[in-house]
Image (cartoon, helix red, strand yellow):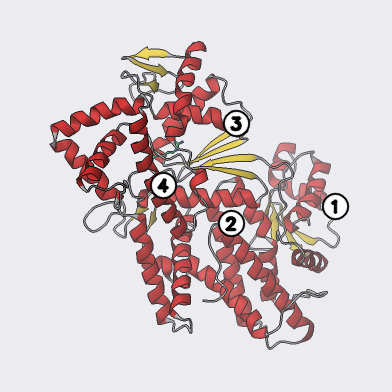
Amino acid sequence: MTSTYDTLHQRLQAAFDAVEPGADPVLRTSERSDYQSNGVMALAKRAGRAPREVAAEIVRHADLDGIATVEIAGPGFLNLTLAPTLLQHQLSALLDDDRLGQVAATTPKTVVIDYSAPNVAKEMHVGNLRSTVIGDALARMYRFAGHEVIARNHVGDWGTPFAMLIEHLVDESSDHGAKELSIKDLDGFYKAARVKFDADESFKDRSRRRVVALQSGDPDTLRLWRAIVDQSIDYLNLVYVDLGIALDAKDVVGESHYNDMLAGVVADLDHAGLLVESGGARCVFPPGFTNRDGDPLPLIVQKSDEGFGYAASDLAAVRDRVDHLHADEILYVVGVPQAQHLEMVYAVARMAGWLPDRVRCEHVTFGNVLGTDRKMFKSRSGETVKLASLLSEAVERADAALRERNTDLDDTARMALAVQISRAAIKYADLSTDRQHDYVFDLDRMIAFEGDTGPYLQYAYARLRSIFRRLGAPWSPQGVAFSLGTSQERDLALGLLAFPEAFDAALVSLQPHRLCVYLFDLAQRLTAFYDACPVLTSEGDVREQRFALCDLAARTLATGLSVLGIEAPEQM
Ligand code: ARG
């Protein structure tokens, strides 16, 4: 189906084209009417004409019969009110469309999304939350839009700290005579290794020798390294499962994956005449990057000790993603502190000819997670907070909230629901703020069933489902006549019809919060609708129409939540 917005846009575009080919109608939803077209003023200015006169000309050209009525307002706004025939037609089409009016991409793109990417051998902490949640939402949104998404969990699984961890693992395993190498507590393991490293000279020496062994590919060392990485990744996967993140072992393609390509990166940069020796290190100086004193900034590809750095693996990753994955777009959902690093990586990759202009690279940045004191979120003892403990606390609170509501669920069902609610609370709080902004991590507010929260939207869905449960028989739409007799029904209908443009706007701007704003608005329209329009006790066509609106609302909420990575339980 053609969405309501697109239908209106096409008609207006034709009218604008008649006055000035290609002029933008600037069509938006509006408080004053259903939609407003604001493109007249700019057009009139370009033409040196009176705006209201241009507006009148557009209106004359616009074929809006059965589509909308139009009124010229103020300096030349076109206020558009959708016609009943259009509403009837669009709502009926929506009932038959599982995409709810959103049109799947006609030329699907291959989109590589680099997200989550914790450093392994450490527990996932709150600093890993935003990349994980935002990246996952974007991946789902792109998939829904019909694109092919390749997730890349670019974990930090290589480098000198691993030498220390390997030595510690060797000690631990022989101390306890354990055949199987096992790390139960990642953070504890890491800290213990660190303490030993700082205190024990012989341990430090062994670790240094281990660095050499690791870099030269000594099989025994690699086996131990693999054991540590594998266990960390098993653990990561548990957190992803707990949080409902669509990442698994096959998406883990970390720094180590690019090892074999690093020598080639350096050799090819050298061939291209881009490498410069600086302080013993091999660097590229992409134009336009300078430090505070105005001196050119290097991207260090190979350090003076011959070791390859973080930049080298990122360059290799770009080549891999372009050449082997055939990426049309690469999104990096990575913290702001790495902005310059990434810009330099793209610049060098473009200089080397590895990143054609047609491939879009975008750094998807995000703000910090703050505590209720508005400082960086920390535990009471001042440590970074583990994601696993945050999640279990959220589940407990959600469970407590459910007990208070006196649901008739048994313990198992209530617990399962508490898990779904807690994930929704955490993800929605993260996704519903403009991602560039910081947000306060406040479980009490996030888990509330009232207000702009994930559980509130879940509840809005569950309430709709309960109406259908109470009906007692399956409902299916049959020639529903949408007469939309009340303003609340009409407002709800307009909200439902606006899903495609809300989704598209969120996708194009890589701003999941726009979709959250839309869903919250839809839930509020629903509340107003319930207050004014009884569903089960109404009769005849009115009842059919109300059921149809409820059905569409439930599907829209469930779809919107699911593309954000949030589940919609049937009952709450
Ligand atoms: N592991 C890195 C960190 O924790 C993030 C990796 C981001 N992705 C990339 N391709 N550099 O800071």
- N-terminal of the pair, mark 3 or mark 2, is 3
Q: Is residue 322 visible?
A: yes
The reply to whether dot 4 and dot 1 touch (C-beta < 8 Å) is no
Q: Is residue 150 above or below residue 484?
A: above
- N-terminal of the pair, mark 4 or mark 1, is 1
Q: Is residue 235 left or right of residue 191?
A: right
Per the image, the residue denoted by label 2 is 563
Q: Is residue 460 above or below residue 172?
A: below
Nearer mark to the viewer, of 1 and 2: 2
Alpha carbon separation for disc pair 3 and 1 = 54 Å
Per the image, the residue denoted by label 3 is 324
Q: Position of residue 365 (x, y in %)?
A: 46, 43
Alpha carbon separation for disc pair 4 and 1 = 64 Å
Q: Position of residue 195 (x, y in %)?
A: 18, 41
Q: Depth check: 64 or 538 in front?
A: 538
- N-terminal of the pair, mark 3 or mark 4, is 4
Nearer mark to the viewer, of 4 and 1: 4
Alpha carbon separation for disc pair 3 and 4 = 24 Å
Which residue sits at x=76%, y=51%? 9
Task: Give the quarter of the image for residue 4.
Answer: bottom right
The reply to whether dot 2 and dot 4 touch (C-beta < 8 Å) is no
Q: Position of residue 437 (x, y in %)?
A: 43, 50
Per the image, the residue denoted by label 1 is 60
The reply to whether dot 1 and dot 2 touch (C-beta < 8 Å) is no
Task: Give the quarter of the image for residue 42.
Answer: top right
- Badge 3 crowding class, 10 Å Cα cut-off, few under 14, some 14 to 19, many 20 or more, is few
- Of the numbered discs in the image, which one, if any, rests on residue 233? 4
